[in-house]
Each structure stands twice: as C-alpha cells, then as structure tokens.
Amino acid sequence: MSPLIRHLILISFLLITHPHPTTSDQSFISVLITQNGLDFIKNLLITKTVPKITPSPLSQIDRAITVPVIGNVHVVLSDISIYRFNVGLSQVMPRANGVTISGSEVTCDLSMKWHYSCGSSPFPISVSDSGTASIEVDGMEMVVTLGLDIREGSLKLSTIECNCHIHDISVDLDGGASWLYQGILDAFREEIVSTVEKAITKILKIEISKLESLLQSLPKQIPVDDLASLNVTLVNNPFLSDTSLGFEINGLFIENKTYTRSYGNSLQPPVHCLDPSKMIGMAIDEAVFKSAFALYYNAMFMHWTVDKLPEQSLLNTAGWRFIVPELYRKYPNDNMNLNLSLSEPPAVQISLQKIDAVIYADLIINVLEADNTIPVVCISLVITGTSSVQITGNNLAAHLKMDDFTMSLKWSKIGTLHMFLIQPVVWTIVETVFLPYVNARIGIGFPLPIISGFMLRNAEITTSDSRITVCSDVTYEELFDGIRVYDS
Ligand SMILES: *[C@@H]1O[C@H](CO)[C@@H](O)[C@H](O)[C@H]1NC(C)=O
Ligand SMILES: *[C@@H]1O[C@H](CO)[C@@H](O)[C@H](O)[C@H]1NC(C)=O
Ligand SMILES: *[C@@H]1O[C@H](CO)[C@@H](O)[C@H](O)[C@H]1NC(C)=O
C-alpha cells in the first residue's frame, strides 16, 4: 500500500501558489500537479497497490435453503478469499472538494469451499457433500473521494466517499449437483456480492489510512547540508481545479538551529507551465534564494583564505614589487595570503529569462611575517554576473558567469595604491579562484521538494519576474529507504 500513499503524498507536495484570501501564511515555493501528473500517480498507485490486495478470508456464509424436490438443505460457504484483482479502467479527477479516484471494469476472482447437508423428509437418509468453487466478479466499480486539507503543515485526508459496487458474479462449482449450483446462485448471490463489496471497501479504507499516516510522517524539512534545511511545511489550503492540484510550501531555508526570518513578499499567481503536458510544475520565489544567502552569510560561511594561486608568485611580496612598490619595500620577500569574504549577502534578481547576481566582497591582502598575519590592504569588490540554472538529479543547480566587476580601496597600511595596476591581478584572482569556488558550491544546488523515490525527468526551467518555474515529468523508482518508510 505504500505506493498509494506515496502518490497522494506527491500530490500533496505539488502545489500551486494561489492566493487564499482567508489564510495568509507565506509561501515561497508552489507546486502544481497537472492532470498528467495525477494520472501518473494514480497508475503508480494502482499498479503497486493492487497486487497487494490479498485480504484475509471473508466471513463464512451459512444458511438453510429450500430446494424443490429435495427440501431443506443447510449450505455453508467458507474460506472465501480473493486471489486475483484487476482494474480495467481508472480515472483520477480533482474536484472542488477533493480528489476522486475511480476504477471501473474491475474484475476479481474468489475461491471458496462449499458444504451442504440435508436429512429431513422426504428423504429419510441424511445426505451431505462438499467441494470447492470459484467465483468471478465482473463489472465492479470503485470510487474513492478524498478531501484534502492542510493541518499543522501536513496534508490531511478525509474520506468523503469510499465504496464499491458489483454488477454481476458467476459461480463455477467444482463437483456438486446442478441443483446446488442454482440454489447457491439464487440464495447466496446477494450475500456474496455484499460480502465482497464490504471487504473491498474495508481494504480501500485501510489503504487510505496508511496513506494518511504516511502523509503525516513526511518530513517538514529537507536537509540541504550540515548548516541548512529547506522548510517544506505545507501552508494554506491546497489549490484544486478540475485539471490540477496545487500546494504551497513555506520554502525558505532554515538554519540547522532554530532560525526564522520572514520576507514580506505577497502571494504569487499559480504556477504556469509553457508545456501543459508536464506532470508537475513548481514555482520558486526569489525569497527562497535570499533566505539561503542570508543564512549562509550569517553563519559566517562566506569567507575563504586563499594560499594557492595559479600564479603562485603573487603570494609573495616580490611578485608585487612593480605593482605595489611600497608593499615590497616594507615587507621584502614575505609570503602572503588573501582573505576573501563577502561583505553582505549576495543579491539575486530573477527577471524574464534572466537571473542577475551581485556579490559584494572584501579582499584583504595579508603579509605573513614570521608567525604573524599582517593585514595590509583591503579592497572592496562588487562583482556582477548572470546566472544560469539547471536541474541536476532533483536539485536546482546554478552556474555564475561574471559580467563585470568594480573595485575600490577600503583601507591601506601602505599608503595609496594605483588601482588600475592592481585591477588585472584582482580580476585574475576572481576569475581563477573565487568564481570556480562559488560555482563548485552552487553547481551542486539545493534539493527541490520531491518525495524520495520520485525523479524529475525532462525538466524545463523558465524564469519570470521574481520566480523560477520548473515544469517536469517524474519517474518513480522504489528506494530501499522508501520501502522502509512507507510499508507500515
Ligand atoms: C547541524 O549542525 C551540526 C554541526 O554543524 C551537525 O553536526 C548536525 O549534523 C547538523 N544537523 C543537521 C540536521 O544537519
Ligand atoms: C517552517 O514554515 C512554517 C510555515 O510557514 C512555519 O510555521 C515554521 O515556523 C517554519 N519553521 C522554521 C523552523 O522556520
Ligand atoms: C578575513 O576577514 C574577515 C573580515 O573581513 C575576518 O572576519 C576574518 O577573521 C578574516 N579571516 C582570516 C582567516 O583572516
């Protein structure tokens, strides 16, 4: 039953940012599951769940029937069990109040044992017999309508409708007389039908409650690394239209410790995919990136000591002899290192087809003299660039390309410097050391809120005013972890 649950869950994760006038929790990631996505989930659910439908034997039926000529016969049907179950057609329909999953042309086979005895007049001798029978259920229909609600950050299901209706059954007795066959059909037909209907409805309800507890157990944070997690708490109400299902996720980065910071953005319109056949759409607000940068910045994670350069001579004052003569004069032939740190969180601006980034950094030049590190110069840098994003696995990864940079002297212990002489050197450092470092980190990216086991496939990314939209198909792969989590 695990998969059913998973499906629902996935559904729940895919949300749309949709303005909800009544509630106002802020949401910075929206996920939308389209009809194709819902179909995928529904099919997955059915193919994974149906083979597991092996209920315990149904309750036995016993009754006295009157058979012409023979008289009163006591018949017992026992060990009734379902052993093959097949869903012919199925459909999933989002509705205003929830999601309806229906199956039609459902068939199943049952096996059972029969036993009868009769002993009263007109036969003075008591007669009894027993054997087996198979029953084929044709044209069964099942309908499950689930209400969806967000409570305390999780998706809550309520069963609005759950039933099963059988159109017809046929019985095949193995042994036994023909009067028995007709007698069973006439007398037990309805009872067999209602017993099977009840049993299937019960199985469906059990599956729904497993799904429900799986949903409740889904994590509200997805770890990104040691320092940060993504807050995937569901907020507001799900968005339901007759072709899609959407969810809103808080979506901000949170520090490993308790860390909160709020942004004042207003709600965005729903996710919009250029290719409507994609299974899911996810919109990620600029504020998500801001929360990530603010978090890493505040955690003092953004400074680096550079003691290796492609041009190692630049890490000795001798290498600067002609560029900054005063440096060499004061500290001849001393080794140096560079301390590069961000002076404020990077700024990102997402606009139509473009992501601009501005990085503010201080470059401190240190001279290493004996055991001392002596800061001698600090240069402020403003690096502007454009970023491209792509999907790597289930991560949203980025690559930054520098467009321009400006520099200014912040302070100096060796007098004024000729900035135009230093500029090419600093440019080289930024290009060969700083940018590759930044790209190595953002190239890994951060995980999108996708349930484990599901993988994005053929994702398309568009950027628009202040948000990045990822529209994608998904595939499903059973994970060891997944099995452990979902099989309750
Ligand atoms: C939180 O950070 C600490 C120290 O950096 C680390 O040991 C721990 O595993 C982190 N926790 C999570 C959930 O990432
Ligand atoms: C995660 O988001 C939820 C919903 O917006 C919020 O209530 C909760 O405080 C957030 N968690 C953290 C640790 O910031
Ligand atoms: C680098 O410079 C920053 C301030 O700009 C300072 O906080 C940090 O301690 C320095 N790191 C090293 C290793 O010198």
Image (cartoon, rainbow, N blue to C red):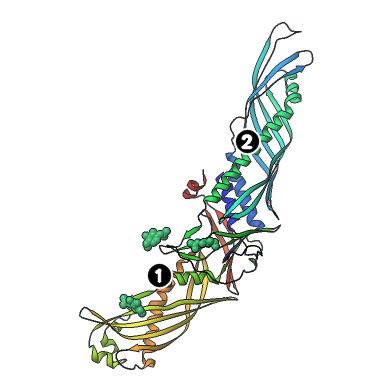
Count of residue discs: 2
Mark 2: which amino acid? Arg
The numbered mark at residue 344 is: none
Inter-mark Cα distance, 2 to 1: 58 Å
Residue 448 appears in the picture as rendered: no
Residue 408 appears in the picture as rendered: yes
Mark 1: which amino acid? Ala
Please identify the residue farthest to the front as the structure is shown.
22
Which residue occupies the foreground of this view, 246 or 395? 246
Residue placed at 68% from the left, 37% from the top?
107
**Left or right: 332 in relation to 205:** left
Q: Could you tell me which quadrant the N terminus lies in?
A: top right
Mark 1 residue CB less than 8 A from any atom of ligand 1: no
x%, y% of residue 152? 56, 55
Which of the two discs, 2 and 1, sits closer to the camera? Answer: 1
The reply to whether discs 2 and 1 touch (Cβ–Cβ < 8 Å) is: no
Dot 2, how many residues are within 10 Å of its Cα: few (below 14), some (14-19), or many (20+)? some
The numbered mark at residue 299 is: 1
Task: Give the quarter the ligand 3 occupies.
Answer: bottom left
Residue indicated by mark 2: 84
Dot 1, how many residues are within 10 Å of its Cα: few (below 14), some (14-19), or many (20+)? few
Say what secondary structure mark 2 lies in: strand
Please identify the residue farthest to the right as the structure is shown.
68
Residue placed at 47% from the left, 49% from the top?
481
Task: Give whichever of discs 2 and 1 has the lower sequence position.
Answer: 2
x%, y% of residue 301? 39, 71
x%, y% of residue 255? 44, 65
Q: Is residue 274 above or below residue 182?
A: below
